[in-house]
Amino acid sequence: MLQDIRNNAQGTIAKVIIGLLIVSLSIWGMDAIVGGFSGEPEVATVNGEDITEREFFRVVQMESQRRLSRMENPDPSMLDEDQIRTDVLDSLIQEQVLIQDANAQGLELDDADIDALITQMPQFQVDGQFNRDRFVSTVRNMGMGVGEFREAMRKQYVVNQIRAGIVQSGLVADENAGQLLQIQNQTRSFRVLNIPASAVADTVSVTEADIEAFYGENSAAFQKPERVDAAYITLSQGALAESIEIDDAELQAYYEQRSADLASEERRAAHILIEEGSDADETMATIQERLAAGESFADLAREYSIDTVSAEEGGDLGYAGRGIYAEAFEEALFALEEGEVSEPVRTSFGVHLIRLEDVRESEVPSLAEMEEQLRRELAREQARERFAEVRAELADSAYAADDLAGPAEELGLEVREATGITRQGGQAPFDHAGLVRQLFSEDVLEAGYNTELIDVGDNVSVVARVREYHEAEQLPLDAVRDQIRATLEQRKTREALDERADKIIADLEAGETPEGIDEWSSYEGLARNASDVGPAILQQVFSLPRPADNTRFGKAVTANSAAVIALDEVTDGQVAEEGTELNQLREFLASLEGQREYAAYQQFLRNRAEVERP
């Protein structure tokens, strides 16, 4: 059989087939050959153009990573994968509609334009210059090839051209902007009459019949929610560290390793700093000549140095270790012998002459002094390495086990218990939404499986299982009687306050003076953001119509008080022609109008498109 294949491979027909494959590959690439037989699956077709499954899954992955990055504590179990897929597919369909529209309008970029855009993007630059390695690695980290990225840029750029054109075309009439600014800067003068809850207390009563009726009408609100009791295992890097024993040999080796870091050398330097310039070399040569002639370094520093603070101290900079000074300065300083002066050293500050005044070395603490700290450091380091390994073992073991006792015994961990966990959570670690969602999932709650291993914090993971399920229970009336009474008293107090405010307003509008009211509090020319009165009152003040001949009345009612409001005067805000505030508002309104027009344009294209989903 193999010999037949070998013989046929040398024949004319085989050579023709190979020749056709070579031509196809050279013209269309491998995708043309593979695609010709199988084709690439699509998730949707927009006006006859496919959105491929590969592109769809790539964008789904990118969107998942984006949403994770926005979480305070990233947790993949909190992602709604179905919603992500729906959102991504909708966005890809809309994108395809916009790209087709841009193509129809003849908008396109050539390769040179794409190159120019890419080389100008700061994320692809190193020290202000385009770096191809940075470009390739960044694009690959996005899950794209270079060709895909270039094509995506080509599409998005032309789409953004249309968007920018429409958004920037938004217009708003000057009169509208001016009128809105007048309203925004408006001030109002008004009076407030406060009615405390005590004023209506004698009219508020709650009977046993009221309580029973409320309990019957709202029985669903007085239930003890369904809950579970759970067993769980917590794996933490901190606990692992506490369980690790460090022997004396390890400790000694680590101490010797750390000794080099702990031993530090500090050098006391003095310098003379002059400005960089055409005469810098000549000035520095003069200083060196005078030093060679025996003049004091300190006196020359006071005469020449532009570092006025150190110059007053004869150029003294005090003691410093490595990493403090500029690199060139540090290299020169640590190459000097005590009392030696360097050659001129150039830094961004200017030109220096450096003198080494003194050297001091700090003593390394003894092993006994550092033993406790070093043991902790070593244990944490070993725990960090061990944590990932144990986590993987626990995840595999718990996935295959029918309970948690086996995995716990195998890894030397403790099975703990928690009770009364509801769908809203419970005590830590069941205050983690992802873990609670797993606990109440069908597989765990009904089928009896363990949860997945969930990361509930930094280097803390938990696996749990349901021990017992408790259905929701109706709470007896006696257990909630006081709660219902307080609710009804609050409700009836508010209703009574509302009625009292309405009665006072009716009397005032009829020209009568209500009995038993306190004095009004007056406020002159308050703006919308004033803090002189509560927000509920201020909101009502600016909701009342402008008074014509008579005062306008309104009310603001809360659970504990009511306020009757008398609006006396409205003063429109001042608008400076071509002022900064007016111009900014005009630009903002025009931008909003442009965005609305672009949204309508997008919807028009989407409605007109023929979309097919398999």
Image (cartoon, helix red, strand yellow):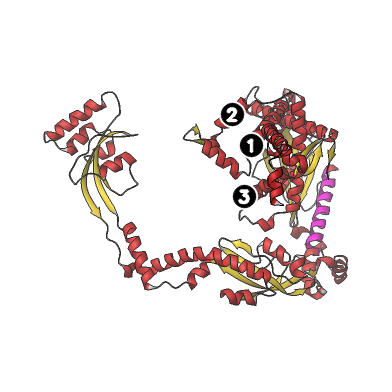
The answer to whether residue 571 of the structure is visible from this angle is no
Please tell me whether residue 501 belongs to the stretch shown in magenta. yes
Crowdedness near tag 1: few (<14), some (14–19) or many (≥20) residues, C-alpha within 10 Å: some
The answer to whether residue 214 of the structure is visible from this angle is yes
Q: Which residue is mark 2?
A: 115
Please tell me whether residue 164 belongs to the stretch shown in magenta. no
Residue 83 picture location, percent across and down: 75, 50
What's the amino acid at mark 3? Ser
Q: Is residue 331 above or below residue 366?
A: above
What's the amino acid at mark 1? Phe
Instruction: Give 293 or 316, whichever is nearer the viewer.
Output: 293
Helix, strand or loop at mark 2: helix
What's the amino acid at mark 2? Asp
In three-dimensional space, the C-alpha distance between marks 2 and 1, rounded to whole angstroms, equals 11 Å
Task: Tell me which label, 2 or 3, sits earlier in the chain.
Answer: 3
In three-dimensional space, the C-alpha distance between marks 2 and 3, rounded to whole angstroms, equals 30 Å
At 72% across and 63% down in the image, what residue appears? 437
Task: Tell me which label, 1 or 3, sits earlier in the chain.
Answer: 3
Helix, strand or loop at mark 1: helix
Q: What secondary structure is the stretch in magenta mostly built from?
A: helix
Residue 204 picture location, percent across and down: 81, 63
Helix, strand or loop at mark 3: helix
Q: Image quadrant of residue 409? A: bottom right
Q: Can you tell which mark lies on residue 149?
A: 1
Q: Which residue is mark 3?
A: 69
**Residues rendered magenta in the picture:** 488-508
Crowdedness near tag 3: few (<14), some (14–19) or many (≥20) residues, C-alpha within 10 Å: few
Q: Is residue 493 above or below residue 40?
A: below
